[in-house]
Image (cartoon, grey):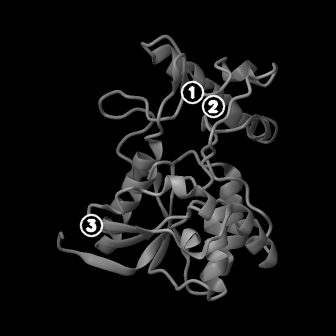
Amino acid sequence: MLPGIEAPNGILSYGGGRQTVAICALILQGRLPRPDRIVMADTGRENPMTWDYLRDVTQPAMTAAGMPIEVSPCDLRTVDLYANNGDLLMPVFTNSGKMRPFCSAKWKAEAMDRYLRTRYGINAGVKWIGFSADEKRRLKADPTRGNWSFRYPLVELGITSDGCREIIAAHGWPQPHRSSCWMCPNKQDDEWAYIRDNYPELWAQACEIDQETRENDERGGVWLHRARVPLSVALDRDAASESDPRCETGMCFV
């Protein structure tokens, strides 16, 4: 293990979606122990609704309990839409399928590690990840990464995604929106429409990213929308109905 400080109680990786909000409620209720720190990684493109919920609901409650939610700034990322080798990091749709998401690892996990290391000297311990009991397929086969091991509190307690909704409601909090970036290809049509109708400037930027990534692609096309049409017109037609797992926690493949 590299020299440094260990976080024995764990670091809660707060994504701002249903699962990690439920974990915060469970901590306040004493049903889960207090983690050493709670950290949210700013991707630079998180849904505005997630920031609103953090500001209005979870941050005041956790701060009052002596556990403020810290934000790892987006400038700790070392790459943006493309990796250093030029590969697109988002899980875009292609003519032959869908690319794997590497964005969360680069924009969240690695940036958070860098934040903990540079700010506190913490470079080892346990990371709490908010996968629910009905998402066991997403648990890492290898329970460690470097000096970090992973804990899944909701899986340990047998709490499903629906159970998270019940915990949040019983705690008196409103239900949060699903955490994701505003241009994430994992969005469903109702989520795209919400961005379009409520945040037109972000919708315009998402359409611009969609077009630019397609222009830069050498394989014949990539799309942010599952219908494999330009995002700017995707909601004006009957989009193809495809089964696609949603990322509820904002921790895709991390």
Q: Is residue 162 left or right of residue 224?
A: right
Quarter of image, res 114: bottom left
Callout 2 amino acid: Ala
Q: Residues within 10 Å of mark 1 (few under 14, many from 20)?
A: some
Whether residue 152 is situated above or below residue 193 in the rendered picture: below
Furthest residue to the top?
220
Compare marks 3 and 2 and give the one earlier in the sequence.
Answer: 3
Callout 3 amino acid: Asn
Which disc, if any, is residue 147? Answer: 3
Quarter of image, res 203: top right
Residues at circles 3 and 2 in contact by the CB criterion of under 8 Å: no
Compare marks 3 and 1 and give the one earlier in the sequence.
Answer: 3
Whether residue 148 is situated above or below residue 34 in the rendered picture: above
Whether residue 79 is situated above or below residue 17 in the rendered picture: above
Closest to the observer, 29 or 132: 132
Q: Position of residue 208 (x, y in %)?
A: 61, 24
Give the secondary structure at mark 1: helix
Q: Position of residue 188 (x, y in %)?
A: 72, 37
Residues at circles 1 and 2 in contact by the CB criterion of under 8 Å: yes
Q: Nearer the viewer, mark 3 or mark 2?
A: 3
Whether residue 206 is situated above or below residue 142 in the rendered picture: above
Quarter of image, res 26: bottom right
Give the secondary structure at mark 2: helix
Residue matched to label 1: 209
Residue matched to label 2: 206
Picture quarter with the N terminus: bottom left
At horizontal 59% and vertical 76% (from top left) the residue drawn is 157
How far separated are the C-alphas under marks 3 and 2? 36 Å
Callout 1 amino acid: Ile
How far separated are the C-alphas under marks 3 and 1? 35 Å
At horizontal 68% and vertical 22% (from top left) the residue drawn is 227
At horizontal 75% and vertical 19% (from top left) the residue drawn is 233
